[in-house]
Image (cartoon, grey):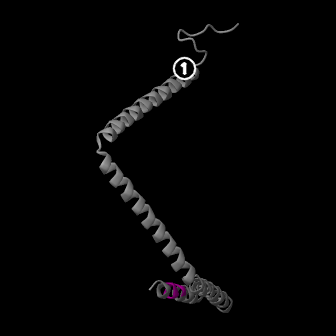
Amino acid sequence: MKAPLRSHGFDKPTDLDDHLAELDEEAEATAAEAKTEKTTVKRTRAANTVDPSLRAELEELRREVDKIRRDIKRLEAAQHSRHRPAQAHHERDRENSRLMTVVRSVAVTSLASRIFASSPVMAALVAVVPIALGLAARRSEVA
């Protein structure tokens, strides 16, 4: 036998919660729409009260700013295209330097671990050297 419907008309409490959540979302959406309508009405009123000569001057200034932005982008692109090969070469050198630092650190650590396998304290002391070398190399790259 099926259980009788609750007084609110929903079978489960979660159904009621879902329905209330949907109603809240709808209320928020209508409030947001009303707010945007009010702001657009205010903007149109303000736009209607602005002097046409000021509007024309503002549009001219906007066009000039857009033109200046385009010029800046064009000049930046031209500048970057001239310096690209040198920058790419330096970036490769920097990457190789970092890679060689890591390789050197691993090689020294591996060699130290083989030489001092019988003494863990000595191996730990020798392992600190490549780490210090790596830190020193990184500091010199940053500076």
Relative to 59, 93 lies left or right:
right
Does the stretch in magenta take in 132? Answer: no
Return the x and y of residue 135 as percentages of the image width and height.
Answer: 50, 84
Report the front residue among 3 and 116. 3
State the residue at coordinates (45%, 30%): 28
Q: Which residues are magenta?
A: 134-138
Which residue position holds label 1?
Answer: 16
Residue 141 at what x, y percent from top left?
Answer: 50, 86
From what the image shows, is residue 93 above or below residue 56? below
Q: Compared to 26, does 75 lie above or below?
A: below
Quick one: 97 or 60, which is closer to the camera?
Answer: 60
| Three-letter amino acid code of the residue under disc 1 | Leu
Count of numbered circles on the image? 1
Quadrant of image for the C terminus: bottom left
Mark 1 neighbour class, 10 Å CA radius: few under 14, some 14 to 19, many 20 or more: some
Which residue is at 35% across, 39% downward? 43
Residue at point 58%, 81% (across, down): 84
- Kindly give the residue lying farthest to the bottom in the view shown: 115
106 shown above or below 67: below
Q: Quadrant of residue 123?
A: bottom right
